[in-house]
Amino acid sequence: MTAAPSFFENPSPPGLTGIKSWLLTHDHKRLGLMYMWAILFWFVLAMFLGLLLRTELMSQGRTIMSAEAYNSMFTLHGVIMVFLFVIPGIPAIFGNFFLPIQLGTDDVFFPRLNLFSWYLFMLGGLFAVVSLFLGEGFPDTGWTFYVPFSVGTESNVSLTVTAAFILGMSSMLTGLNFVTTFHRMRHPDMGLMQIPLFTWSLYATAWVQILATPVISITFVLIMLERFLGIGLFEPDKGGDPLLYQHLFWMYSHPAVYIMILPGMGVISEVIPVFSRKSIFGYKAIVWSSMAIAIAGSLVWAHHMYTSGMSDVSVFVFSLLTFLVAIPSAVKVFSWVSTMYKGAIAMSPPLLLSLCFIYLFSVGGLTGLVLGAAGTNIHVHDTHFVVGHFHFVMFGGTGFAFFAALHFWWPKMFGVMYRFRPAYIGAVLTAVGFVFHYVPMLILGLQGMPRRYYDYLPQYETGNFLAGFGGYLLIAGMVIMFVNLFVSLRNPRMAPADPWGGTTLEWTIPSPPPMENFVETPVIPDFPYDFRKFMAGGKGGGKGR
């Protein structure tokens, strides 16, 4: 098996060579890597913009930029992070690469559509870049594009909204491809309860992508119609209502939170059992909780709008639903912790990052309950508390799950091992920097500091300085992690097929995988997390220390 040519060597479609064999590829693994390099570029750019924002806020008054530049920076930081990193990150990279392998098949159901989705993603990113250089000014509305500001501003919002629309199309097509692959392409011997949890998380996410994304696409079209035709859907003078926009926006954007976090939860559900040498606790509960999150998460959008004047009955209903959606998330956390209980723990960089995820995501979830309760929400609405909560969930959650996935599947994707010590140092520094960066924001919000403000009152300066200091630690940790991974490509130490002792199908094939994924017909295990053979053989924690 180890002599099988990898997908790096075999072009797809056959007969092409060089860059054409990548730009015209139908192979899901090559497309996963093409997504990875593009998404990492956007991530680095957005992190740089975020660091500039926090540097500006480290002291009162103007520090390094004007108020107009600040508005444009946080708009672009939000648009790039949300639409070009957090939403597509795990599904587009690791979903494309590993979903067909975990299902025991050779590719996704629509390989050409998969390539088209990648080109849409690149086109949307191009429009986002072009919006910086055309028009009368950088977009300055924030990533939410709230009306009436997004309709009346003279900045170049139109291209940015168009970019988000195109990226939504890419997301929908990817979701459609994953759902079809799940039902039509999985190995005939693989029943529903034999499917790995990462694939289940992608399946639940794909339904949210298919059903929720058209709402935001229509909303962005309405912004364009308002800007160019002035039809008045959001203008009270013409019989419209600006709150209609908020409802439409959050009817997508809160389900989008679960597009972001569900694949991350799937990653953690793969990492924890492997390094605990123990079957995942509550497999069926995790499966059904993923589907419950996808469904219930679509019903809570109006908790973003408690201060908009909605009725007390509406506030009560949406508050109750918000608390209920926390239950399936808690099921996952308790299942992960129970899996580690009395397990044969083998510490590794993926496990360390997963433990950071569990802690930081739990803090994000608990602070989310503060916002879900109308009484406390009214006091901290649109303050820095919301910024801290959002980043604890999205970055402390999805971001750290993304880092864990990179370190977990890097040997399988590239066939090389990285060094453990720099990975540990980078992970710890990233986690410590994260806490120093975002905990002060929670405190500032409780003190009353509004978000999206270029300047602030003197009593908020200490908290903002500490947040900026934490931001530099955070960046330093991520630089160490990424440099360590990329150095492993230049000075390769070859990885075995199963460096961690995993049990799902991707660990049964060579590293990196061959062109058609499986050299021999895969044998589907009765349960995807059966570690008895490893416990009997004493196989442990991997190589590359």
Image (tube, rainbow, N blue to C red):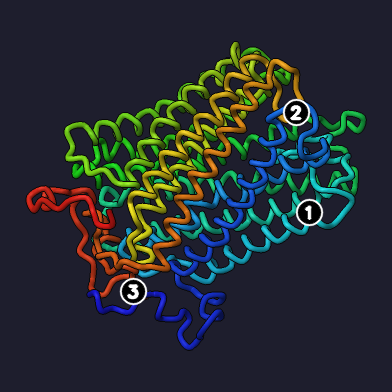
Expressed as whole percent of the image width and height from the top left, the position of residue 337 reads 28, 31
Q: Nearer the viewer, residue 249 or 425?
A: 425
Residue that badge 1 annotates: 132
Name the residue: 54% across, 18% down: 370
**Closer to us: mark 3 or mark 1?**
1
Observer able to see residue 502: no
Amino acid type assigned to the residue bearing label 2 in the image: Tyr
Expressed as whole percent of the image width and height from the top left, the position of residue 129 reads 73, 57
Dot 2 or dot 1, earlier in sequence:
1
**Closer to us: mark 2 or mark 3?**
2
Q: Which mark is residue 453?
A: 2
Q: Is residue 107 above or below residue 74?
A: below
Check disc 1: other Cα within 10 Å, few if <14, some if 14-19, many if 20+.
some
Expressed as whole percent of the image width and height from the top left, the position of residue 90 reads 47, 51
Name the residue: 64% across, 34% down: 250
In the picture, measured across the screen, residue 386 lies left or right of residue 326, that is right
Residue that badge 3 annotates: 514
* Disc 2 from disc 1: Cα separation: 21 Å
Dot 3 or dot 1, earlier in sequence:
1
Dot 2 or dot 3, earlier in sequence:
2
